[in-house]
Amino acid sequence: MKIVDAKVVVTSPGRNFVTLKLTTDEGLTGLGDATLNGRELAVVSYLADHVAPLLTGLDPHRIEDTWQSLYRGAYWRRGPVTMAAIAAVDVALWDIKAKAAGLPLYQLLGGASRERIGTYGHANGRDIPELLDSVRARLAEGYPAVRIQSGIPGLKAVYGVSDTDDTGAPVLHQQARPLVEDWDTAAYLRHVPAVFEAVRAEFGPELPLLHDSHHRLTPIQAARLGRDLEPYRPFWLEDCTPAENQEALRLVRRSTTTPLAVGEVFNTVYDYQALITEQLIDYVRSAVTHFGGVTPLRKLFDFAAQYQIKSAIHGPEDISPVGMAAAVHLDLAVHNFGIQEFSGHTPLTDEVFRHAYTFTDGHLHPGEAPGIGVELDEELAAAHPYAPAYLPVNRLHDGTVHDW
Ligand code: CS2
Ligand code: MG
């Protein structure tokens, strides 16, 4: 079998998605997600201008060899653009291989290690009463675990709150300039324990509660927050410090037993080396889409397993159903599965990307369709062309830019 066509499809059924479609001389097709939120067209160019010409004529079964040649051959390794492009090729090749075998991808990854995949959903509120309503809504939808994000008194716009509507669905800022949010760490650190206290008082001790600090704290601030949250037994504290500095987590880890989750902006295993071998974290959070695909993410999970660290694949709305499908196959197969983030997509997005994976009673299953189980409706995709959109920026009260 040979690859005869490599096509990059950009569509915006409410938000932008970048998809690679590979076609073989036997008529089999494979899809891969290459969506890099807010910087989409850089990956489109990487794929269309530099990768697609290398793929035609290759045997699609040679996944490892193709991965290594794209990674090593570029010389300029790592980075989100490169690794999103390689991820799309990797997933499209796994899709083809599994289709050729007539099997759902998880069977090629060792088969199912569980019956279904536990998820967490997002609950957001501008204040605590609104957050409690949002938690109630997620529980009514069946979610077994909930991430709680709340507005902070005195702040106008905060990550995870200002960009979602009352149902928890993201409101997109498809405009020429980023939305400016505002930030005050002292106010945040005072407020979050009260948020956890209110949610525990309302929903009891058993509901797994997660929280995302989105890289905004210094190590000592993160240590304080981890300690203050201990009485409420969070499932995890996510991205408490800026991701570039692995050493920051040593201090946080020494100071608190609150479990730590890290990695949605990581691209390779090298970003994790100290965190895993020193056992500084509890969950690895990379997305298939941003980590170079199923091939390296499977290796990461096997590495993490040696240190009792579990998987928790990044699953926001900006991972397309193609990336989500690949994640769900991996989730079903790996032994050290932890939890899967899942917000779902809009009905229109699910129409553009018809998928076999299902979400029932708060649990995902990849389904039994051969491959990753996603079909792209190219006509519908073309009817929703690319629309520029930016992620926000965050500023302190004096105007200084801060992590958001
Ligand atoms: C996030 C994301 O899902 C998460 O935990 O932190 O919402 C992240 O902000 C987006 O994926 C950025 O594109
Ligand atoms: Mg996050």
Image: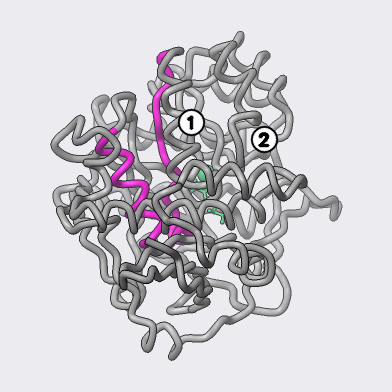
Q: Tell me residue 139's x, y (percent).
A: 22, 47
Q: In this view, does 149 lie to the left or right of 44?
A: left
Find disc 1 in the rendering and name its residue: 284
When asked about the image quadrant of residue 165, the answer is bottom left
Q: Which of 110 and 125 is in front in this view?
A: 110
Q: What element carries label 2?
A: loop
Query: Which is in the foreground here, disc 1 or disc 2?
Result: 1
Q: What element carries label 1?
A: strand
Q: Tell me residue 311's x, y (percent).
A: 40, 31
**Lower sequence index among marks 1 and 2:** 2
Q: Residue 196 carries which label?
A: none
Q: What stretch is highlighted in magenta?
A: 308-333
What residue appears at the point 40 percent right and 64 percent down from the top-left corner? 31
Q: Is residue 132 left or right of residue 212?
A: left
What residue appears at the point 27 percent right and 37 percent down from the top-left corner? 202
Q: Is residue 269 left or right of residue 242?
A: left
What residue appears at the point 27 percent right and 48 percent down from the top-left corner? 105
Q: Is residue 341 above or below residue 164?
A: above
**Within-10-Å neighbours for mark 2: few <14, some 14–19, many 20+:** many
What amino acid type should be assigned to the residue bearing mark 1?
A: Val
Q: Tell me residue 404's x, y (percent).
A: 67, 49
Q: Which of 215 and 49 is in front in this view?
A: 49
- The answer as to whether callout 1 falls within 8 Å of ligand 2 is no
Find disc 2 in the rendering and name its residue: 243
